[in-house]
């Protein structure tokens, strides 16, 4: 797919948004990829990354390798994600720590709009479609509300965590970062980054590569043969994640499984900031509407 320079800049902007989403446990970069119209292209391009490219590089040279791997696509997308991680991560964490209701309101509006947008892509509504959507909703609700675990970062566990996290990362509605939280690896991997623990980072990175190359091929096959069913499942995933990012949540000790419960603003024990939260929700929803309206205007 040939793009203009303007289109590549827009692709980098999408990568920036994906990186910002993945930096926050509970928000999925896959959702951003879907609503910005690059999800299936991303999956297709990932499946082109194979070990045979090493042979192509050695025999045919850098040009053939760059073309087969669709280097411009990944360069623009990954550049946007890298800039996002550098510039947004600390700001996002500060906002969550100091203005949690407002930032989660923004993401709630963003994800709510995404649910509608992805659902509109369904070509046929049948009972089977509804059942798959409901299953996806329940599964996402279950996964995103599992309590965190405490695990030792053994070599095999690091590889496993990387493979599972990247698989979740490319699924709309399921946050790869939150999967790491559930596995008990999020903070420890953050510490490994701070300590420049090369061994742990390489093991985790190998898991990312294994999960990415294998799971992307499964998704490509599913899209080719069961596209409408897959879209219904992904819509359910996004819908099921809404509970986790509801702005007004309180801790509960009544359930060993559900550690936080969503409440209405009137039941929230602290200042609810209802008006401001509504404004931020509408802002998130407005971004999705704007993205949909301009999606086909940039080639």
Image (cartoon, helix red, strand yellow):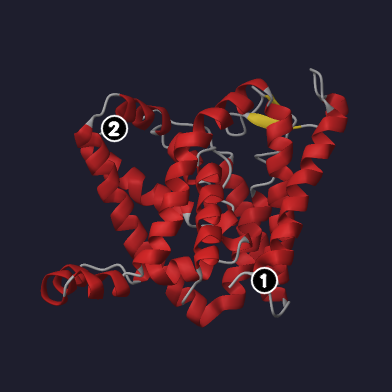
Q: Which residue is mark 2?
A: 153
Furthest toward the front, the residue is 5
Please indicate whether residue 276 sits to the left or right of residue 196 in the image: right
Residue visible at 33% across and 25% down in the picture: 194
Q: Position of residue 222 (x, y in %)?
A: 48, 74
Tag shown at residue 42: none
Q: Position of residue 133 (x, y in %)?
A: 66, 64
**Tag 2 secondary structure:** loop
Residue visible at 66% across and 25% down in the picture: 254
Residue 286 vertical placement versus 38 (above, below): above
Q: CA distance from mark 2 to mark 1?
A: 47 Å
Residue 97 vertical placement versus 227 (above, below): above
Please indicate whether residue 260 sits to the left or right of residue 206 in the image: right
Residue visible at 26% across and 68% down in the picture: 50
Q: Is residue 264 visible?
A: no
Q: Quadrant of the C terminus?
A: bottom right
Q: Count every numbered label the image shows and give the total.
A: 2
Which image quadrant is residue 257 in?
top right
Q: Could you say which is closer to the camera, residue 198 or residue 258?
A: 198
Please indicate whether residue 170 sits to the left or right of residue 134 in the image: left
Residue 167 vertical placement versus 68 (above, below): above
Which image quadrant is residue 292 in?
bottom right
Residue visible at 58% across and 41% down in the picture: 26
Q: Position of residue 289 (x, y in %)?
A: 76, 58
| Dot placed on the residue nearer the N-terminal end, 2 or 1 | 2
Please indicate whether residue 72 sits to the left or right of residue 284 in the image: left
**Tag 1 secondary structure:** helix
Q: Position of residue 5 (x, y in %)?
A: 50, 65
Q: Nearer the viewer, mark 2 or mark 1?
A: 1
* C-beta proximity under 8 Å, tags 2 and 1: no
Tag shown at residue 297: 1
Which image quadrant is residue 273 in?
top right
């Amino acid at each position: 797919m040939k793009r203009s320079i303007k289109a590549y800049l827009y692709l980098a902007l999408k990568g920036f948004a994906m990186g910002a989403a993945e930096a926050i446990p509970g928000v999925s970069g896959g959702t951003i990829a879907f609503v910005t119209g690059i999800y299936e292209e991303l999956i297709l391009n990932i499946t082109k990354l194979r070990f045979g490219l090493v042979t192509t590089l050695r025999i045919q040279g850098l040009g053939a390798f760059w073309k087969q791997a669709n280097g411009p696509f990944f360069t623009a997308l990954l550049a946007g994600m890298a800039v996002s991680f550098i510039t947004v991560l600390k700001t996002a964490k500060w906002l969550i720590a100091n203005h949690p209701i407002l930032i989660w309101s923004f993401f709630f509006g963003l994800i709510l709009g995404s649910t509608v947008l992805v659902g509109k892509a369904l070509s046929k509504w049948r009972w089977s479609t509804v059942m798959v959507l409901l299953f996806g909703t329940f599964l996402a609700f279950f996964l995103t509300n599992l309590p965190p675990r405490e695990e030792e970062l053994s070599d095999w566990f690091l590889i496993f965590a990387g493979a599972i996290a990247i698989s979740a990362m490319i699924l709309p509605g399921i946050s790869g970062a939150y999967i790491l939280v559930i596995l008990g690896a999020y903070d420890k991997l953050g510490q490994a980054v701070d300590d420049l623990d090369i061994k742990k980072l390489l093991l985790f990175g190998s898991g990312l590569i294994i999960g990415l190359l294998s799971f992307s091929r499964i998704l490509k096959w599913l899209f080719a043969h069961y596209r409408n069913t897959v879209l219904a499942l992904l819509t359910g995933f996004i819908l099921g994640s809404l509970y986790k990012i509801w702005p007004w949540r309180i801790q509960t000790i009544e359930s060993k499984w559900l550690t936080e419960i969503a409440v209405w603003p009137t039941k929230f024990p602290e200042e609810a900031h209802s008006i401001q939260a509504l404004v931020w929700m509408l802002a998130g929803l407005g971004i999705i509407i704007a993205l949909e309206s301009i999606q086909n205007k940039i080639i």
